[in-house]
Amino acid sequence: MLMVNQLQVDIAGSAILNGISLQVNSGELACLIGRNGAGKSTTFRTIMGYRRPKSGSILFEGRNIAGLQTWQIAQRGIAFSPEESEVYADLTVRENIELPTWTRPQGTPARDRIDRAYSVFPKLRQYLERGGAQLSGGERKMVSIARALTLDPKLLLLDEPFEGLSPAIIPIIGEGICALREMGQSILMAESNVHHIPEFVDRLFVIERGELIFTGTLAQALRDRGVMKVIAGEVKELEPVH
């Protein structure tokens, strides 16, 4: 489905990504994990067309999308929930979530897309007429992911879905990701905390200073002391998230 090959990205003359290669197959949950500043968000924003690569290719369903406009990439079926959520403050929860059905009307009927989004985060039905500016950080995160879903994506990019959230909301986001996985939604997730990686993740990529240092399963990463020193800060026994 998605294949990133030898992606290099420079920002202000500095190399941020140095030959990143990763793959996400249809129906998979893959996770790109690394410390803050390692290059996770740059990878996602380059896939979405916010940044142009210096070299390399980004193949989605066999077509190179590197260099396309963001709206063209979204039209092809990639949706993005950014780390900052970026919920529209002047729109209600209902309007935020329905917005992608106006901008990408083709495909699955709008009502079905909206119902699917609310099935993942049913709590949002309580806040339909609440403005985006009145939402908590956790509520904004739910709206951001739900809004991405109503684009009817083939691939969903989740950038740090747990970052900055209260302990009370983290399980709700985790349950939503689990529900998406059970629906067969293809997901690429970025994460900086190894404890937030779902145990059902199919594929794990570890990024450090703009380079991939590991590709494999979560179980393999947990057994690799060098990898764990990078993503956990120290070598110790860790159990995957349940």
Image: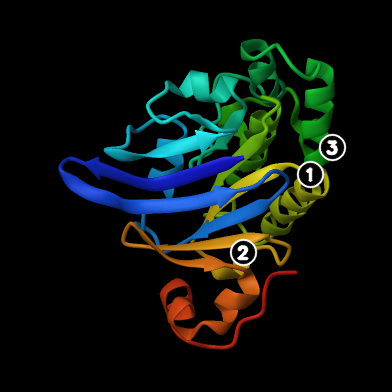
Evaluate whether residue 3 shows in this view.
Answer: yes
Whichever of labels 1 and 3 marks the residue nearer the N terminus, that label is 3
Label 2 neighbour load within 10 Å: few <14, some 14-19, many 20+: some
> Gap between marks 3 and 2, in whole Å?
22 Å
Contact between marks 3 and 2 (CB within 8 A): the answer is: no
- x then y, percent, for residue 198: 68, 63
Which quarter of the figure is the N terminus placed in? top right
Label 1 neighbour load within 10 Å: few <14, some 14-19, many 20+: few
| Residue at 46% over, 24% down | 70
| Residue 11 shown left or right of residue 118 in the figure | left
| Residue 7 shown left or right of residue 186 in the figure | left
> Gap between marks 1 and 3, in whole Å?
14 Å
- Depth check, mark 1 against mark 3: the one in front is 1
Residue, disc 1: 184
Contact between marks 2 and 1 (CB within 8 A): the answer is: no
Mark seen at residue 196: 2
Is the residue 32 above or below the residue 52 in the image?
below
- x then y, percent, for residue 193: 53, 66
- x then y, percent, for residue 202: 68, 60
* Residue at the outermost left position: 13
| Residue at 15% over, 43% down | 13
- x then y, percent, for residue 238: 61, 82
